[in-house]
């Protein structure tokens, strides 16, 4: 079941998501919002199933309106270890999500929240599940592999899009790419240097393989728009 989690950052526009990542919301079996992320649902054409948070960023009038509409609100203490977004992700998992799309996780005044949301991709509870952070131009996913067991990720999108490969925390080893302008074959990207930034997808169906480590795969939709939007089903 694909779940959409709405974080409290600046939400992307529906038209931008549809153009950059056709099929991002199909199928969708669950929509969970983190606090003020609930306000993004109407413009995105999403029906809220539940809201999770401490209500510190949600106007009481908006909270009352959601309650009047019958949307459940799972309130949590303001002083807590997890962010509201992390709790919303965990609620989605508890409700049976096997795939998660996270929106509103990058923009806004709090860069610490944006970084923490990207780090959530490495959450132990999400291990092995397809998870993508999307905005109107960007898709971020995490590829994880242990030594002796290669992991791979399909990078379906537009030719001309930017693709950056960034090791997360530790060196990423045994990287092989297909369909990128600057190819890698069994290469190592050490954590720290920015060697893997600003590659380019040359075909609509590219791929990256990883031998060991953790690799952020960041795609930026700045290639030419497809002639028939919506034909690249299955994203993200």
Image (tube, rainbow, N blue to C red):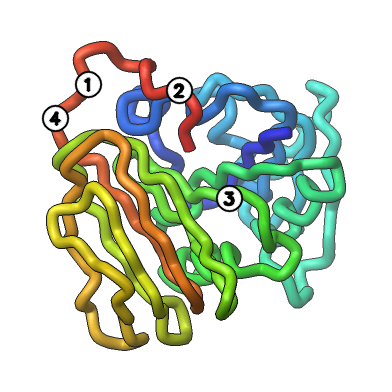
Residue beneath disc 3? 131
Q: Between tags 2 and 4, which lies in front?
A: 2
Q: Which numbered disc flags the more N-terminal residue, 2 or 1?
A: 1
Seen in the image, is 136 located left or right of residue 106?
left
Seen in the image, is 186 located left or right of residue 104?
left
| Residue 14: percent from left, percent from top | 42, 26
Q: Secondary structure at mark 4?
A: loop
Query: What residue lies at 32% left-to-right and 73% top-to-bottom?
Result: 186
Residue beneath disc 1? 226
The answer for how far apart the CA atoms under marks 4 and 3 are is: 25 Å
Residue beneath disc 2? 233
Question: Relative to the observer, which residue lies in front, 90 or 97?
Answer: 97
The answer for how far apart the CA atoms under marks 2 and 1 are is: 12 Å
Q: Which numbered marker is on residue 224?
A: 4
| Residue 202: percent from left, percent from top | 16, 43
Q: Secondary structure at mark 2?
A: loop
Q: Which numbered disc flags the more N-terminal residue, 1 or 3?
A: 3
Q: Which numbered marker is on residue 185?
A: none
Q: Quadrant of residue 15?
A: top left
């Amino acid at each position: 079941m694909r779940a959409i989690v709405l974080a409290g950052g600046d939400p992307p526009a529906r038209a931008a998501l549809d153009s950059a990542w056709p099929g991002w919301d199909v199928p969708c079996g669950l929509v969970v919002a983190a606090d003020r992320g609930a306000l993004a649902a109407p413009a995105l054409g999403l029906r809220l199933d539940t809201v999770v948070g401490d209500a510190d960023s949600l106007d009481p009038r908006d909270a009352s309106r959601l309650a009047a509409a019958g949307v459940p609100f799972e309130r949590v203490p303001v002083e807590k270890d997890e962010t509201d977004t992390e709790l919303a992700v965990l609620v989605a998992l508890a409700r049976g999500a096997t795939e998660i799309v996270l929106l509103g996780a990058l923009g806004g005044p709090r860069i610490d929240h944006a970084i923490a949301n990207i780090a959530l991709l490495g959450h132990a509870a999400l291990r092995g599940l397809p998870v993508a952070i999307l905005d109107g131009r960007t898709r971020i996913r995490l590829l994880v592999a242990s030594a002796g067991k290669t992991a791979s990720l399909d990078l379906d999108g537009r030719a001309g899009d930017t693709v950056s490969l960034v090791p997360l925390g530790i060196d990423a080893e045994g990287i092989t790419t297909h369909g990128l302008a600057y190819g890698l074959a069994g290469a190592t990207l050490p954590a720290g240097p920015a060697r893997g930034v600003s590659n380019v997808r040359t075909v609509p169906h590219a791929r990256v393989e990883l031998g060991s480590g953790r690799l952020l795969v960041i795609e930026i939709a700045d290639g030419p728009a497809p002639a028939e939007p919506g034909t690249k089903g299955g994203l993200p």
